[in-house]
Amino acid sequence: MNAETASAVTIPRATFASIVTERLRASIVNGSLKPGSQLSEVELATSFGVSRGPVREALQRLVQEGLLHSEPHRGVFVPVLTDEDVLDVYVAREALESAAIRSIISSGTTAVASESLDRLVTLMEKAESAGDWETVGNVDLEFHVALVDASGSPRLKRMFGTVISETRLCLGVLTADDARDDLVEEHRLISDAMKAGETEQALAVLKKHFDDAVVTLMRRQASVDAAPGKGVEELS
Amino acid sequence: MNAETASAVTIPRATFASIVTERLRASIVNGSLKPGSQLSEVELATSFGVSRGPVREALQRLVQEGLLHSEPHRGVFVPVLTDEDVLDVYVAREALESAAIRSIISSGTTAVASESLDRLVTLMEKAESAGDWETVGNVDLEFHVALVDASGSPRLKRMFGTVISETRLCLGVLTADDARDDLVEEHRLISDAMKAGETEQALAVLKKHFDDAVVTLMRRQASVDAAPGKGVEELS
DNA sequence: CAACTGCAATCTGTTGACAATAGTCACCGG
DNA sequence: CCGGTGACTATTGTCAACAGATTGCAGTTG
């Protein structure tokens, strides 16, 4: 990460706009930028050491990705995800990933897909037995990205990129609390079902996988809401 | 069009960027801007009578919609859709619209969905009997947009917006040549199947609908390729 | 005659400043 | 005490100019 940043500063073969976009996206999904907080163009511009132009471009991109919310003449804000949003993210994921599974199996490229998928599941299992839940969470997402990648559809992949970012947004970091017993196993089941050409079986496991994730997130969100949260603008 | 321009000059209630975006989008989907051609920022700016800022913003929006292709430090181009692209667009559409159908039926909001869907099908049938193929094509797309809208999923809707734009891009204007006998009827079948709660039936018709569209587009593309086309850069 | 190197033109990327709109807040009057 | 009106401020929309990069051409050299 350091090397990338350093080379970016010295030799911006990538544009400032794309750099700012990446940095902002990372800050949003890893939680550095708290949901609900406002992002000022001038503030970001000075903090990044660039002009408003690239910042403006980056903000616009992220708004269209759904990672930021823009209120005209008010400002852009980090979105606060409601229960409906969480549900909706998983509706979108199911749509995309189901299509990917169908596409992979029907096109007969299951073998190459399973190879990378299995590798990731093995990684997950290792991280799980090591109790490294953060890695489990990251590899989890990698698995699903690899799944959609394997479909070979640029558009599925493109759309999934934004949705997976939103997933990260509402996921934060995975902790031991969120880990279900069958979280890792479900990935193995999906990969195996695909390998066996059992389309319906794979889709069923995927759906269960998402349903479980949603209830876990809902429950966590409920506990956060119940807690005397750090209201940003309540008692100012 | 004149009125819009005039009001825009005097009272820009909409921003220049959004105006340029609309105009460009229209030019792209209706074919005024030939695929493969480069769009110069300064050229567009002068032709629209605005600065490069708004033009740049408009171009960026369209790039993210998939209606334009950007090569860093090179410029933005109107994409040339290959057969794989056409296929991929319909893979993406099937993913999204299938999910929409499932979501609508399972959430029991089929009644309200069918109402607007039926209305559009009726419009299509009228246009068809009038031989107005352009209207048939437009209402066709409206039908599918309404279908995804009815799912009530903001993310499905957002993703579909870009894909439907790409569909327009590879569709151009519908002519009598492209019109299949069962084109309009299939929409009625989808709506009816949904109304009856026949999920699998609706999905099957949708798939056939897309498969037919793809072969039609492929055939047309093949004929275009075969024709001694106006190669833009071949014989310079 | 072909290939390589250097230059120039043209485009994008970026900047800083200006202008206008909308939201906010304080003040005044009823 | 409450409502309206005014100015103020923050943010966005827009512009013209500058800088960096890429492409194509021309001149030169093997």
Image (spheres, coloured by chain):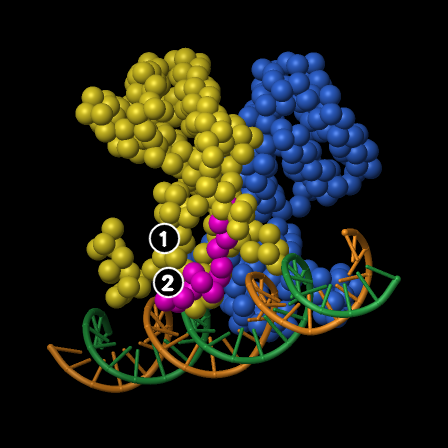
Chain colours: A yellow, B blue, C green, D orange
Q: Nearer the viewer, residue B30 or B144?
A: B144
Residue A120, by quadrant, is: top left
Q: Percent from the top left, x then y, of residue D26?
A: 32, 83
Q: Secondary structure at mark 2?
A: helix
Q: Percent from the top left, x then y, of residue B143?
A: 69, 33
Q: Is residue A56 magenta?
A: no
Q: Which mark is residue A227?
A: none
Up the image or down, B84 lies above or below A52; here it is above
Q: Nearer the viewer, residue A73 or B232?
A: A73
Q: Percent from the top left, x then y, of residue B200?
A: 58, 15
Q: Which mark is residue A48?
A: 2
Name the residue located 76 percent from the left edge and 26 percent from the top edge: B115
**A207 horizontally vs A111: left or right:** right
Name the residue located 78 percent from the left edge and 30 percent from the top edge: B119
- Which residue, given by chain and number where applicable, does mark 1 sit on? A23
Residue B104, by quadrant, is: top right
Any part of residue B77 in sight:
no
- At label 1, the amino acid type is Arg
Structural crowding at the residue carrying mark 2, measured as other residues with C-alpha within 10 Å and reported as few (<14), some (14–19) or many (≥20): some
Up the image or down, B186 lies above or below A204; here it is below
Counting residues from the start of the chain, the first of labels 2 and 1 encountered is 1
Q: Mark 2 near mark 1, Cβ–Cβ under 8 Å?
A: yes
Name the residue located 57 percent from the left edge and 65 percent from the top edge: B54
Name the residue located 28 percent from the left edge and 60 percent from the top edge: A8
Structural crowding at the residue carrying mark 1, measured as other residues with C-alpha within 10 Å and reported as few (<14), some (14–19) or many (≥20): some
User: Could you tell me how many numbered marks the image carries?
Assistant: 2
- Numbered range of the magenta stretch: A36-50
Up the image or down, B110 lies above or below B86; here it is above
Q: Nearer the viewer, residue B203 or A73?
A: A73
